[in-house]
């Protein structure tokens, strides 16, 4: 897996999530209904599990990966995240749950450190919006997924409200845009980094998927794709 030797070498998004990880983990532990419902929808999209190799990209504190490992005792589950703090939290939680079929490591969706066709199923929640090379990320998802394998994605849908439009007009490299963009990713849907349904359809055209289904649900968009 990708290794990061020092905080100075980490990309800004990794430092951002490192700083946010403890707070975000407590929020997930609180059990927001929207997150619980989303988790069930994503796991249902990938079920049933039978001797699968499952990759959870952007695993955070390991919520999805550990849930899959508990349901799929005969499957191998790998969770990766760009944040070292999140990876350490996930490892601790897997150890506390005595899970021996799940592992966690640093990783970057834009350059996955796995061989072609490594996984039968992939889960990717809230990751595509925060990467800079989105088409490359889609190609990497397709590359490591086996033919016939299933990909389940959850992405927050960008708001079309006044705040979202105002943020989108801020100078691209400005500190104000960066700060509001990050706040919008975590606490609302007004970040210009978030995508619409049509933008996601166009993005997935970069991947080698034989089937693609998009299902808007509230403020989220759920995507299932078969390679």
Image (spheres, rainbow, N blue to C red):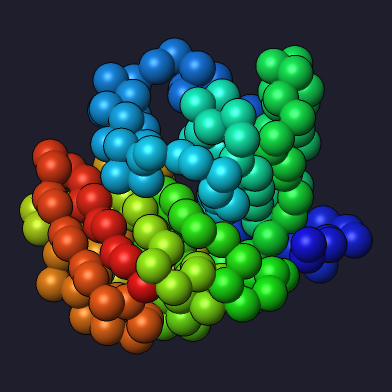
Residue 178 makes an appearance in the image: no
Image quarter hosting the C terminus: bottom left
Task: Say left or right for 224 vs 173.
Answer: left
Task: Say left or right for 49 vs 20.
Answer: left
Q: Would you identify the image quadrant in which residue 172 lies? A: bottom left
Image quarter hosting the N terminus: bottom right
Residue sitting at x 44%, y 73%: 147
Residue sitting at x 37%, y 81%: 207
Residue 219 makes an appearance in the image: yes
60 to 12, vertically: above or below: above
Residue sitting at x 70%, y 35%: 101
Residue 224 locus on image (x, y percent)? 27, 57
Task: Say left or right for 18 vs 177.
Answer: right
Is residue 146 or residue 219 the one in the foreground? 146
75 to 122, vertically: above or below: above
4 to 70, vertically: above or below: below
Residue sitting at x 24%, y 51%: 222
């Amino acid at each position: 897996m990708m290794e990061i030797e020092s905080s100075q070498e980490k990309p800004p998004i990794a430092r951002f999530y490192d700083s946010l990880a403890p707070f975000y983990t407590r929020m997930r532990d609180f059990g927001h209904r929207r997150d619980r419902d989303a988790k069930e929808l994503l796991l249902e999209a990938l079920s049933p599990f039978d001797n699968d190799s499952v990759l959870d990209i952007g695993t955070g504190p390991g919520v999805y990966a550990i849930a899959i490992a508990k349901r799929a005792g005969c499957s191998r589950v790998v969770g990766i995240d760009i944040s070292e703090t999140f990876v350490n939290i996930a490892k601790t939680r897997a150890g506390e749950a005595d899970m021996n079929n799940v592992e966690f490591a640093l990783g970057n969706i834009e350059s996955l450190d796995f061989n072609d066709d490594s996984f039968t199923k992939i889960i990717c929640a809230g990751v595509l919006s925060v990467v800079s090379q989105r088409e490359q990320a889609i190609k990497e998802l397709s590359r490591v997924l086996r033919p016939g394998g299933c990909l389940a994605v959850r992405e927050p849908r960008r708001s079309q409200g006044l705040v979202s439009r105002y943020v989108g007009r801020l100078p691209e490299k400005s500190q104000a845009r960066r700060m509001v963009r990050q706040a919008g990713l975590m606490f609302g849907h007004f970040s210009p980094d978030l995508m619409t349904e049509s933008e996601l359809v166009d993005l997935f055209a970069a991947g080698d998927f034989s089937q693609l289904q998009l299902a808007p649900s509230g403020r989220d968009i759920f995507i299932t794709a078969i390679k």
